[in-house]
Image (cartoon, grey):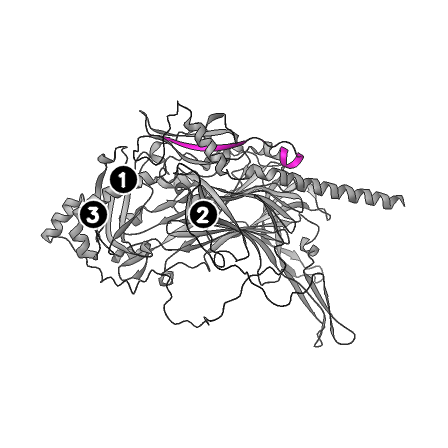
């Protein structure tokens, strides 16, 4: 009797503990929620009220002004957040990170501030970077106001070359009707720190203009804060360089240069459009398969807090870089404190100056603010939960991004587990299987021509997958014969330029606690004596483990042999079978480095040297990149190499794994009009490795077991009701596509 009472007490205690942990996780999730429009306005009004800052509106036409560039949540220090998450204590005050560009002073600069407490700020302080690095004014992202002035320079230059452009392309830049030219600007903006020189290439302004270059490129120096002093330094036309537009036109009129005439433009035969063409072998009078929720969603979303099948986490979309999740727990235990997108780069090669210079570092374009509206039934299932996002970047008021994030459960149409147990006599002993359902949280970033689809997938067996799928338009330049060394001809005068995509993630693992170790595993062949046949030997694979004790030891370089198993574990916690409780990182990637170590722009992306680097957690090492790297990769404000240079001990420490995934893309004709997602998805998995005593999906009631009955009829055992029939959403397709101040 007493043993029964003891079991009841233990059960109630465990239930109470689980309930408390869930309550604390829910309580703390709002610490990571993005700023609300109300908070953004409060911060703006507070800073505009500080006379010493001298702030004016960002949208004024002048460049020599002091204005807010970016505003986003300032995440609390980890130890402060954990007091709320693990003990239910008061949450630290909410704060904002604000980037201010000071152009109206003797020494223009960029300064970052931490402003709080929210929602009624009363104080601000300067935010510093590791090593007290200063932020060069020239490294700031380009704004809409600067683009206005850049277009004016383009208009003047294009007007001087109007006859050439019209004769060469049939299009002009101004007064052009339905035959207008547009432009794409290239970064980084120069060849050394402190420069602001941008190559701009002209394109036909048609649907999908990214793949319509016309063979005319300009180098514009726009460093001065007085746009009247901006100059055109170089011109490239049809493979030839000139020091000015005037020189080009003089030689063009003299007939001393090689001219080009593009094929006549036919708007009815636009190779860059999504409008269907060609023969389809798929019936178009019926819809394809749809995702449905027969009894409604099985996940729960409250604000930025999500629960599903034992998982819980908080999410946000950082304006500067994108999707992040915090306090990731499985069955109430934290697996990771943070899993977040840090940076995405695409480094190109080519024969034109624009192609040579293209090294896109996407946080420099405020990648998180490129998370535009998701289309139901295309980007996400119709039944998904859609969330609006709010950003404050290059604006004077919060901007609402409608339906920019979605959450849904889906079936993968692949069993999570299954077995057919044959009796080898034409029958079976049993069949058992479990349908594989997974929760997905998704955003997309359309950073100009490319669309990145960002996913986190949560499986019922304790596995989390991070995945990015690339689509959108390729970055194309004007075709030259030498260009075939750098890509593929995809149209009569268009080259698809080869490039490498690299994506960087921060994975702050807390596996069964904060004190973790890291080891790698690989196989070695060993020759052992055969115990049952003397004189013979057996070759076997032997598991070789390496304990990594320092940060430098745990930084794996591209081009070097990479271990198969990457294991993070708690040395003080064991599962039922005596194994250290752990998680492993498994890569789905074929990335490689994009530049030699230490080569100019490579200094700004030193994280790209390593598919994996492991460091001790530090609040001062919150991110691996910054919004300033794009326009100053030579002397970056955030240098990832600094994080491992001191080579600290990582034994029994709070560890952060920095993960790089990616792929090489050599464009091909099937990338016209658009790059498709199949084969262009990379990422990594977090997989439990002795973290549990058995597969936790065993708890799923979606299991089906079939056994032969004595009467010859199958006996079906299931724990959830069978769904018969079909259902789809009763909501018609809608899509708005706009985003505006609120």
Q: Secondary structure at mark 1?
A: helix
Give the mark nearest the N terminus, 2 or 1: 1
Q: Which residue is mark 3?
A: 158
Which residue appears farthest toward the right when viewing the image?
1
Residue range highlighted in magenta: 83-104
Q: Nearer the viewer, residue 285 or 450?
A: 285
Residue 671 place in picture, x, y as percent: 38, 60
Callouts 2 and 1 close, C-beta under 8 Å: no
Which residue appears farthest toward the left when viewing the image?
254
Q: Mark 3 and mark 1: span between their CA atoms?
A: 14 Å
Q: Is residue 98 magenta?
A: yes
* Direction from residue 206 to residue 434 in the image, left or right: right
Residue 416 place in picture, x, y as percent: 62, 60
Q: Which residue is mark 2?
A: 371
Q: Which residue is mark 1?
A: 149
Q: Secondary structure at mark 2?
A: loop
Q: Which mark is residue 102?
A: none
Q: Is residue 244 magenta?
A: no
Q: Secondary structure at mark 3?
A: helix
* Direction from residue 52 to residue 165 in the image, left or right: left
Residue 585 place in picture, x, y as percent: 57, 48
* Direction from residue 380 to residue 533 in the image, left or right: right
Q: Quadrant of the C terminus?
A: top left
Instruction: Give the tally of numbered discs.
Output: 3
Q: Nearer the viewer, residue 370 or 645?
A: 370
Name the residue: 47% across, 35% down.
40
């Amino acid at each position: 009797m007493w043993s029964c009472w003891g079991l009841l007490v233990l059960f109630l205690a465990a239930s109470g503990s689980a309930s408390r942990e869930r309550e604390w996780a829910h309580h703390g999730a709002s610490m990571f929620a993005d700023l609300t429009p109300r908070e953004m306005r409060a911060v703006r009004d507070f800073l505009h009220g500080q006379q010493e800052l001298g702030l004016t509106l960002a949208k004024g036409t002048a460049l020599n002004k002091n204005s807010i560039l970016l505003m986003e949540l300032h995440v609390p220090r980890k130890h402060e957040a954990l007091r709320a998450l693990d003990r239910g204590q008061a949450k630290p005050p909410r704060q904002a990170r604000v980037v201010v560009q000071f152009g109206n002073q003797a020494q223009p600069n960029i300064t970052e501030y931490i402003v709080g407490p929210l929602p009624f700020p009363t104080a601000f302080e300067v935010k510093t970077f590791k090593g007290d690095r200063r932020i060069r004014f020239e490294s700031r992202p380009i704004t809409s106001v600067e683009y206005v002035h850049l277009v004016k320079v383009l208009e003047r230059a294009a007007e001087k070359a109007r006859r050439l452009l019209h004769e060469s392309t049939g299009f002009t830049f101004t007064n052009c009707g339905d035959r207008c030219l547009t432009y794409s600007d290239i970064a980084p903006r120069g060849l050394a720190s402190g420069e602001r020189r941008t190559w701009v290439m002209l394109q036909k302004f048609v649907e999908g203009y990214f793949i319509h270059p016309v063979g005319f490129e300009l180098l514009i120096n726009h460093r001065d804060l007085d746009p009247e002093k901006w100059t055109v330094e170089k011109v490239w036309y049809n493979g030839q360089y000139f020091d000015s537009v005037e020189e080009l036109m003089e030689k063009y009129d003299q007939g001393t240069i090689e001219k080009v005439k593009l094929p006549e433009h036919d708007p009815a035969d636009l190779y860059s459009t999504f409008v269907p063409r060609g023969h389809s072998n798929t019936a178009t009078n019926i819809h394809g398969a749809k995702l449905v929720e027969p009894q409604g969603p099985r996940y729960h979303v409250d604000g930025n807090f999500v629960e599903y099948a034992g998982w819980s986490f908080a999410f946000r979309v950082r304006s500067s870089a994108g999707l992040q999740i915090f306090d990731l727990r499985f069955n109430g235990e934290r697996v990771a404190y943070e899993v977040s997108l840090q940076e995405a780069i695409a480094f190109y090669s080519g024969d034109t100056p624009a192609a040579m210079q293209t090294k896109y570092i996407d946080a420099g374009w405020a990648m998180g603010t490129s998370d535009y509206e998701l289309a139901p039934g295309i980007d996400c299932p119709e039944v998904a939960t859609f969330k609006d996002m709010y950003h404050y970047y290059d604006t004077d008021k919060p901007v609402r991004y409608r339906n920019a994030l979605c959450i849904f459960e889906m079936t993968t149409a692949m069993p999570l587990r299954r077995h057919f147990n044959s009796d080898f006599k034409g029958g079976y002993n049993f069949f058992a299987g479990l349908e594989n359902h997974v929760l997905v949280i998704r955003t997309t970033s359309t950073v100009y021509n490319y669309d990145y689809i960002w996913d986190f997938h949560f499986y019922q067996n304790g596995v989390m997958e991070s995945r990015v799928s690339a689509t959108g338009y390729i970055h194309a330049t004007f075709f030259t014969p030498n260009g075939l060394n750098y890509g593929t001809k995809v149209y009569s005068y268009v080259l698809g330029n080869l490039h490498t995509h690299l994506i960087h993630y921060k994975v702050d693992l807390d596996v069964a606690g904060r004190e973790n170790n890291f080891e790698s595993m690989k196989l070695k062949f060993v020759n052992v004596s055969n115990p049952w046949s003397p004189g013979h030997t057996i070759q076997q694979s032997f598991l070789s483990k390496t304990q990594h004790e320092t940060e430098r030891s745990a930084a794996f370089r591209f081009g070097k042999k990479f271990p198969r198993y990457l294991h993070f574990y708690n040395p003080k916690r064991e599962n039922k079978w005596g194994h250290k409780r752990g998680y492993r990182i498994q890569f789905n990637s074929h990335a490689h480095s994009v530049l030699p170590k230490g080569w100019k722009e490579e200094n700004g992306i030193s994280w790209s040297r390593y598919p994996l680097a492991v460091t001790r957690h530090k609040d001062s090492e919150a991110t691996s990149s910054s919004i300033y790297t794009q326009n100053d990769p030579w002397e970056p404000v955030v240098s990832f190499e600094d994080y491992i240079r001191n080579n600290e001990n990582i034994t029994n420490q709070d560890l952060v794994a920095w993960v790089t995934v990616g792929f090489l893309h050599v464009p091909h004709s099937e990338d016209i009009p658009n790059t498709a997602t199949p084969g262009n998805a990379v990422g990594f998995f977090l997989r439990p490795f002795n973290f549990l005593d058995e597969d936790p999906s065993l708890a799923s009631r979606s299991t089906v077991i079939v056994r032969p009955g004595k009467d010859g009829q199958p006996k079906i055992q299931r724990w959830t009701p069978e769904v018969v029939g079909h259902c789809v959403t009763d909501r018609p397709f809608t899509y708005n596509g706009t985003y505006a101040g609120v």
